[in-house]
Amino acid sequence: MPVNRNELEKREAQFLAPYAQLSGATRGRAHEEEPPTWRTHFQRDRDRVIHSRAFRRLEYKTQVFLNGTGDHLRTRLTHTMEVAAISRNIARALQLNEDLTETIALAHDLGHSPFGHKGEYMLNRLMKDHGGFEHNRQSLRVVEVLEQKYPKFSGLNLSWEVREGLAKHHADFDGSEEKQKGAFKHPSLEAQIANLADEITYYSHDLDDGLDSGLLDEKKLLKDVKVWAQAARKIKKQFGALPPESRRYYTIRQIIDEQVTDVVLTTEKAVLDTGVQSADEVRRCRSLLVQYSPDRKQENIELRRYLYRNLYYHPAVAEPNNRAIRMLGEVFAYYLAHPEAMGRESSKTGKSADVYRVICDCVASMTDRYLIQEHRRLFGLDIPSLI
């Protein structure tokens, strides 16, 4: 017999931990809809994220290196897919709701600006007197307002639990009475997993991309980064001498495995120590339960500092990004002076609209290549290659 939503919800209740967020216990959606027949509520949410225009645009948005720099370097989309995979693995190990944590992971960067965190910084600076810009809040805005696919509501009308995970700790998300009263200190364990999986993912793939680009050096990593040195020694002991590509791959895989194992074991202990027995008890905890061990946290701080010094601030990364965000600022300023240049988006700049926010939404939605093309259209300049 076909397996319908009711049967899937029964299986969740049977197999997931008592503190997991069950799809059958969702707080619902802002706009009431008929429930799905063959999917749980969170599976429907996942599919809506994947089919959104904002999700497709992630393919052409920067992770660290500007989009188009190299065929094997991560984009915002490949980063997102890796976050989702690691999220599911951790959730499965802890008997939590894989569908919920995967959906949050897939949606977490929907609101990201072009040109990575440099672009985010520039938009926040341009919006400093108009509410600022932060990509997590923008992701929530994308799924609640900006996606226009359905006839009866704006946004994707995702479940409360997914939107909670996107909002993280922001006070502007008040989707429940408990949240408004301040009873909920933190989101679900599934949301906490997606957040930490994001960190695990960019540690590992930034190392990989840095080595692939030639900006990082294995010998220096062995000397200066404990996380790398430990993993490299284990791989050498297990396999002996390996070709460079295989050696790097297995070392990074070892780092990911160690990070995931550390989070699973540390989180399991934290959950047992607190004695939580429901998803809402998790939300009321005074501290996050999904976390690294103290030693691993310190090792990751060392790794992060190393990446900032030797990769993110490297001239080969920073200078193209700096040129790109100057273009972003110029396009933003042009739209302020000439809102009609936005085309269809200009219709949103009516008397009651916040023109700055309309322009911010428009620019934030652009891919790297579209913003470069738009700059060329507006200013008539032949922009030299950024990469």
Image: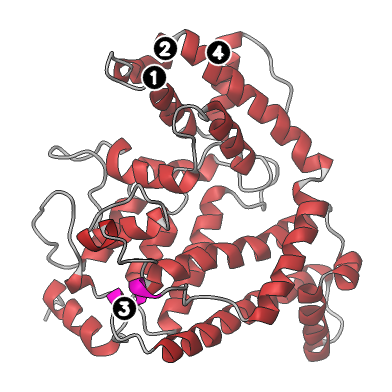
Q: Can residue 387 be seen in this view?
A: no
Marks 2, 3: nearer the viewer = 3
The residue under label 4 is which amino acid type?
Arg
Spatial CA distance of label 4 from label 3 is 54 Å
Which numbered marker is on residue 377?
Answer: 4
Marks 1, 3: nearer the viewer = 3
The residue under label 3 is which amino acid type?
Glu
Q: Earlier in the sequence, mark 4 or mark 3?
A: 3
Is 159 placed left or right of 274 in the picture?
A: left
Which residue in the structure is indicated by mark 3? 281
Secondary structure of the residue carrying numbered label 4: helix
Spatial CA distance of label 1 from label 3 is 42 Å
Secondary structure of the residue carrying numbered label 2: helix
Which residue in the structure is indicated by mark 2? 339
Judge the density around disc 4: few (<14), some (14-19), many (≥20) Cα neighbours within 10 Å: few
Q: Which residue extends farthest front?
A: 181
Which residue in the structure is indicated by mark 1? 355
The residue under label 2 is which amino acid type?
Pro
Marks 2, 4: nearer the viewer = 2
Judge the density around disc 2: few (<14), some (14-19), many (≥20) Cα neighbours within 10 Å: some
Circles 4 and 3 in contact, beta carbons < 8 Å? no
The foreground one among 60 and 318 is 318
Secondary structure of the residue carrying numbered label 1: helix
Q: Is residue 225 visible?
A: yes
